[in-house]
Image (cartoon, rainbow, N blue to C red):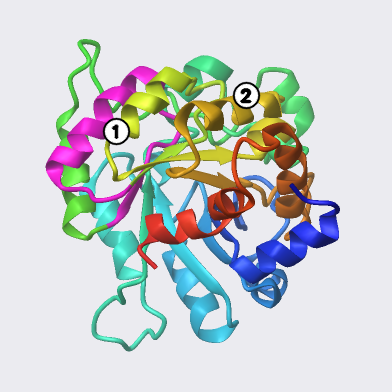
């Protein structure tokens, strides 16, 4: 599909990369970028990035980048315990920070992504036994040695954030939070909920009126959505599948699984994002270019070059409504 990385980089730059999942610090783990240093590398590439942080809303950081640093950044909030878990006030708080000028009377209309719990999701804690993964930065807040010894890190709660009860019924807080997401026309991302939870969540979200849903890295060990699951869920035109490069580079899921999944679902509702920002991941835009180079070989002629590039670019604009 492409002859060399330089050609891929030129093509992606021209088409306008949209990465719907990029980590920014400071955070409980060390990160590669703050909002200014990330803007310094993303803005010259003409990229659009959705900033993610597991501990606090990124809408003010993204608004600052748009107004002061010339970067096309959007923000959101992850519904971990740091913001009170599942609660509509966390959504309201993220919306309140979505303004480029602090003296504006109201937030602007830039898209906001609301992630279901990640490091505090039931499935995440049950799968890994901890919250923050030491591999995300090479160390946790109080050291790789502590994590290796089984010591609890500050990110590990005594009780995870519960979205569905033991009978599979949504807890009241989930319903109220989804209603807030719909009210503010935010984008819902499924975070680290388990496959069974995601299968229940998506129809609920659509029924409540949420217009755009991102299935967050379906191959992540705590998620494990099958290709049959994905094929069923994208029958909703509001739903997009997000394949993140970090699930291959850090969680060691074979990249062939991504290619097989795209063959199963087709490329039309697929987002190819990096989930990068870790100090041990490739910098921007090299990580995106590397992702495209490696995946294009596995997909071969299954998708056209236009459809392949759209998964990195135009499909992201569709889900963001830009």
- Circle 1 residues within 10 Å: few <14, some 14–19, many ≥20: few
Q: Is residue 203 above or below residue 3?
A: above
Q: Position of residue 51 (x, y in %)?
A: 53, 58
Query: Does the segment drawn in magenta span residue 226?
Result: no
On the rendered structure, is 248 left or right of 231? right
Disc with the residue nearer the chain's start (2 vs 1): 1
- Please, what secondary structure does the residue beneath circle 1 have? loop
Q: Is residue 23 above or below residue 173?
A: below
Q: Residue furthest top?
A: 167
Q: Position of residue 224 (x, y in %)?
A: 49, 20
The quadrant where residue 138 appears:
top right
Q: Please state which of residues 162 and 225 is positioned toward the viewer in this rendering.
A: 225
Q: Please state which of residues 269 and 146 is positioned toward the viewer in this rendering.
A: 269
- The structure residue drawn at horizontal position 17% and vertical position 19%, both measured from the top left corner, is 169
- The structure residue drawn at horizontal position 84% and vertical position 61%, both measured from the top left corner, is 6
On the rendered structure, is 19 left or right of 240? right
How far is the residue under mark 2 from the one under mark 1?
Answer: 21 Å
- Please, what secondary structure does the residue beneath circle 2 have? helix
The answer to whether any part of residue 251 appears in the image is no
Q: How many marks?
A: 2
- The structure residue drawn at horizontal position 60% and vertical position 48%, both measured from the top left corner, is 308
Q: Which mark is residue 235?
A: 1
Query: Does the segment drawn in magenta span residue 207?
Result: yes
Q: Position of residue 67 (x, y in %)?
A: 49, 84
Closer to us: mark 2 or mark 1? 1
The answer to whether any part of residue 41 appears in the image is yes
Q: Is residue 306 above or below residue 116?
A: below
- Circle 2 residues within 10 Å: few <14, some 14–19, many ≥20: some
Q: Which mark is residue 257?
A: 2
For the record, the magenta segment spans 186-212
- The structure residue drawn at horizontal position 30% and vertical position 24%, both measured from the top left corner, is 199
Quick one: quadrant of the C terminus? bottom left
């Amino acid at each position: 599909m492409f002859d060399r990385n330089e050609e891929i980089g030129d093509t992606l730059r021209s088409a306008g990369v949209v990465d719907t999942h990029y980590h920014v610090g400071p955070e409980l783990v060390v990160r590669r970028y703050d909002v200014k240093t990330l803007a310094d590398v993303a803005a010259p590439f003409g990229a659009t990035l959705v900033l993610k942080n597991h501990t606090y809303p990124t809408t003010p950081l993204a608004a600052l980048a748009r107004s002061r640093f010339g970067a096309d950044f959007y923000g959101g909030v992850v519904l971990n315990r740091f913001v009170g878990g599942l609660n509509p006030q966390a959504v309201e708080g993220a919306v309140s920070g979505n303004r480029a000028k602090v003296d504006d009377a109201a937030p602007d209309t830039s898209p906001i992504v609301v992630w279901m719990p990640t490091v505090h999701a039931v499935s995440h804690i049950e799968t890994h036994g901890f919250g923050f993964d030491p591999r995300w930065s090479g160390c946790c807040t109080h050291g790789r040695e502590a994590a290796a010894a089984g010591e609890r890190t500050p990110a590990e709660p005594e009780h995870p954030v519960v979205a569905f009860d033991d009978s599979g019924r949504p807890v009241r807080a989930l319903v109220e939070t989804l209603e807030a997401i719909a009210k503010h026309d935010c984008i819902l991302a499924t975070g680290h909920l388990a496959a069974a939870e995601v299968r229940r969540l998506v129809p609920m979200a659509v029924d409540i009126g949420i217009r755009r849903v991102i299935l967050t890295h379906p191959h992540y060990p705590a998620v494990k959505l099958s290709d049959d699951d994905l094929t069923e869920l994208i029958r909703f035109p509001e739903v997009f599948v997000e394949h993140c490069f970090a699930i291959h580079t850090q969680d060691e899921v074979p990249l062939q699984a991504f290619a097989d999944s795209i063959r199963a679902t087709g490329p039309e509702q697929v987002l190819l994002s990096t989930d990068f920002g870790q100090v041990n991941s490739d910098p921007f835009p090299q990580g995106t270019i590397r992702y495209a180079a490696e995946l294009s070989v596995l997909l071969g002629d299954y998708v056209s070059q236009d459809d392949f590039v759209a998964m990195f670019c135009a499909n992201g604009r569709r889900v963001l409504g830009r």
